[in-house]
Structure formats: structure tokens, C-alpha cells
């Protein structure tokens, strides 16, 4: 694929919604144990029930036919946090590509992989990158 932007966007969104939905579901389970917050809405139509097919498929992604205040807050906060962290990572990557050039980054990454396979260094130890992930003096992350 020449342009992988849409693929990256779809897979990142799917993963973000899955992680947020699983977190919201876990918070709701704790909420059922310790006492529920008031409901924001409850959908009475059985076609939209989160316990029956086909919408039961969307439950891991955050769907619920009865939403509490805790579920609502954790869903939107998790979604906003995930989007913010993704934007920060994307902007840092764009900065690295503009500063060092995409070809130089790939060469450094390949060189660090070759050195790691030869036992000379740890992978991803890029000397030219100011924010290198590996501290060579300590020998670890």
C-alpha cells in the first residue's frame, strides 16, 4: 500500500474503542459491586439491548443499553485521553521525520537491529536521536 493513513486511522480507532470499552465495562462491574451511580439513560427497546444479538457484539467497544454516570464519564474521558496521547505520538513522529528524514530513521533502525543481533547493542539504540529510548551507560531502558 502506498498510502497507509486510512489503515492506520481505522486500526487505531478500533483499538482505542476496544480499550476504552473494556475499561468502561470493568468500571461498571466494580460499580455493580460497590453501588451504582444514577442512570443517564435506559433503552427499553429489546432490539437495542446490550444482552442480545446483534448489539452484544458492540459491548466490548463501549455499547450499553443502560448508561450510568460513571460509564459516561469514563467513556468520554478515556476516549479524549486516547486521542490526546495518539496526537502527541503522531506529532513527535512527524517532528522526527522532518528533522532526520524518513530514510535516515530507517537506516538507523536497521543498523541498530543488526547490532543487536550481533550482540553489540540493544535494539532501537539510535545515537543520532536526542530522545533515544535506551541509555547505553545503564544498558537498559
Image: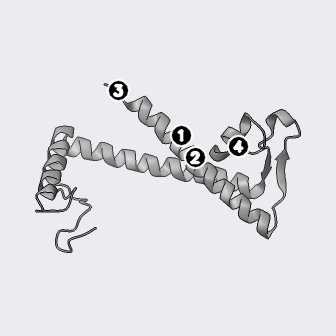
Residue at left 72%, top 52%? 72
Q: Earlier in the sequence, mark 1 or mark 4?
A: 1
Residues under labels 1 and 4: Cα distance?
Answer: 13 Å
Quadrant showing the N terminus: top left
Identify the residue at the far bottom of this view.
138
Report the disc number at residue 63.
4
Residues under labels 4 and 2: Cα distance?
Answer: 10 Å
| x, y percent for residue 59 | 68, 44
Number of the front mark, 3 or 1: 1
* Dot 2 alpha-carbon crowd within 10 angstroms: few under 14, some 14 to 19, many 20 or more: some
What residue would you read off at disc 3? 3
Which one is in front, 26 or 20? Answer: 26
Residue at left 84%, top 58%? 38
Name the colouring of the figure.
Answer: one colour
Q: Earlier in the sequence, mark 3 or mark 4?
A: 3
What residue would you read off at disc 1? 14
Amino acid at each position: 500500500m502506498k498510502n497507509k493513513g486510512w489503515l492506520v486511522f481505522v486500526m487505531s480507532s478500533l483499538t482505542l474503542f476496544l480499550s476504552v470499552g473494556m475499561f468502561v465495562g470493568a468500571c461498571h462491574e466494580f460499580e455493580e459491586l460497590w453501588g451504582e451511580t444514577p442512570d443517564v439513560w435506559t433503552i427499553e427497546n429489546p432490539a437495542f439491548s446490550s444482552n442480545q444479538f446483534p448489539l452484544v457484539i458492540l459491548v466490548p467497544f463501549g455499547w450499553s443499553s443502560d448508561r450510568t454516570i460513571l460509564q459516561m464519564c469514563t467513556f468520554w474521558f478515556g476516549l479524549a485521553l486516547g486521542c490526546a496521547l495518539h496526537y502527541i505520538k503522531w506529532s513527535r513522529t512527524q517532528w522526527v521525520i522532518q528533522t532526520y528524514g524518513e530514510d535516515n530513521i530507517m537506516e538507523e533502525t536497521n543498523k541498530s537491529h543488526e547490532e543487536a543481533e550481533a550482540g553489540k547493542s540493544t535494539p532501537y539504540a539510535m545515537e543520532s536521536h536526542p530522545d533515544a529510548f535506551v541509555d547505553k551507560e545503564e544498558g537498559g531502558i
